[in-house]
Amino acid sequence: MRRVYVAVLTSPDFLFHRADGTVKDAYTLASRLSYWLWNGPPDETLLAAAREGTLGTDEGISAQVDRLIADPRSGRFIADFADQWLELRRLAETTPDPQLYPEYRFLLHEGIAEEPRAFLRELIDHDLPARALLQPGFAMVTQRLAEHYGIAGVRGVEVRKIALPEGSLRGGLLGQAAIHKLTANGTTTSPVTRGVWVMDRLLDDPAPPPPPGVSAIDPDTRGATTVREQLDKHRADVSCAACHAKIDPAGFALESFDPVGGFRERYRSNGKGDDPPEKGKTTWRVNYKLGPAVDASGALPDGRAFGGFAALNDLLSGDPDKLACAFVAHLSRYATGAEVNYADRAEIARIVEGTKGKGYGLRSLIQALAQSRMFQR
């Protein structure tokens, strides 16, 4: 009996929805829509739309997509897609060093974990433009997370939307503590790890794997050197230089944030350094020191220089077409289970171009993907 269970539970017919590469009828399309946006089977309303033929039109598909997203069951899609796209499942893989980051406690963790999902829900519900992925003008925070970000006036453990002042570093994906934590090891940060995440998850332009024999950087928590200084030996290698020129800029800019998402101008150390100004003023014990200064400047491969995180964020958000194309590519992988191949790039460009008049709104992009050849074939 055990062998039978193993055979059933690992069978492709159990794990996947069988398809021959095309939508034969409206009922198949109904199932594709519901398993994409609800993570579950179609309801009677969706089946009725298939039966009556309204799913055979773009208007019918659009109406059903709006209905599915408005339903509470779409929360399964929001959570699962965010986990896969942004790699939020890695959020709890590391525990921040309690000596270096004593402020990281349960309530802060809960706020950090909930922010990206609530943020994605807000973008989709209100069809906000692609550039809002980086510069939304608002943040989704709890009281403890707002305090962590230096934002006053927020009370309670519920996640809520708050307006941000102009020039705030928070709100967008690259200003969220969840992204900073999952791209750190709990003790130190790596511009390479963070740069790889930005290129892959945000821009859909993954970096190639490192050459064989290249060693990782050992974390230095004694405050003797900066990570930029440690990276110089990698960047000096001809076989590494080209990739690092592409990866490192975004990673250097994100050095403005520590492993728990706090903004910093100097690295923390458990060795030599100065006492931080918050010592003796917090509810947690501060034993760490302030070490070398953070240098968050850099230059993109095309030569455009930036002086810090805010300037890089401006440069990236100034190309909403690229952000939209990357979002659709990741969305397509989630919706269809298929990798994006070379021929699909033209279809992605067509989807994105069709939503240009709406600022590449995220719900508009979902609608366009649902009506596209990529999803239906």
Image (cartoon, helix red, strand yellow):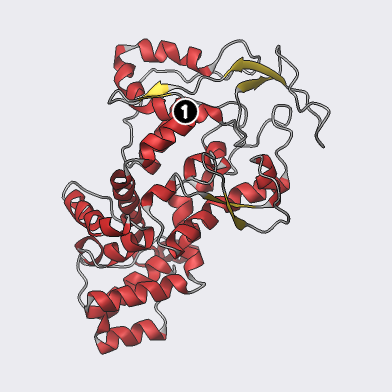
In the figure, 132 relative to 183: above or below? Answer: below
Image position, residue 136 (x, y; %): 47, 49
Residue 13, by quadrant, is bottom left
In the figure, 247 relative to 346: above or below? Answer: above
Residue 1 can be seen, yes or no: no
Image position, residue 20 (x, y; %): 21, 67
Q: For the image shown, how many numbered marks are present on the structure?
A: 1
Residue 353, by quadrant, is bottom left
Quadrant the C terminus occupies = bottom left
State the residue at coordinates (45%, 23%).
Answer: 307
State the residue at coordinates (50%, 49%).
Answer: 137
Image position, residue 111 (x, y; %): 64, 50
Question: Residue 115 versus residue 360: which sits nearer the camera?
Answer: 360
Question: Residue 333 versus residue 351: which sits nearer the camera?
Answer: 351
Q: List the residue tagged with mark 1.
A: 253
**Label 1's element?**
helix
Residue 209 can be seen, yes or no: yes
Left/right placement of residue 158 relative to residue 67 reads right
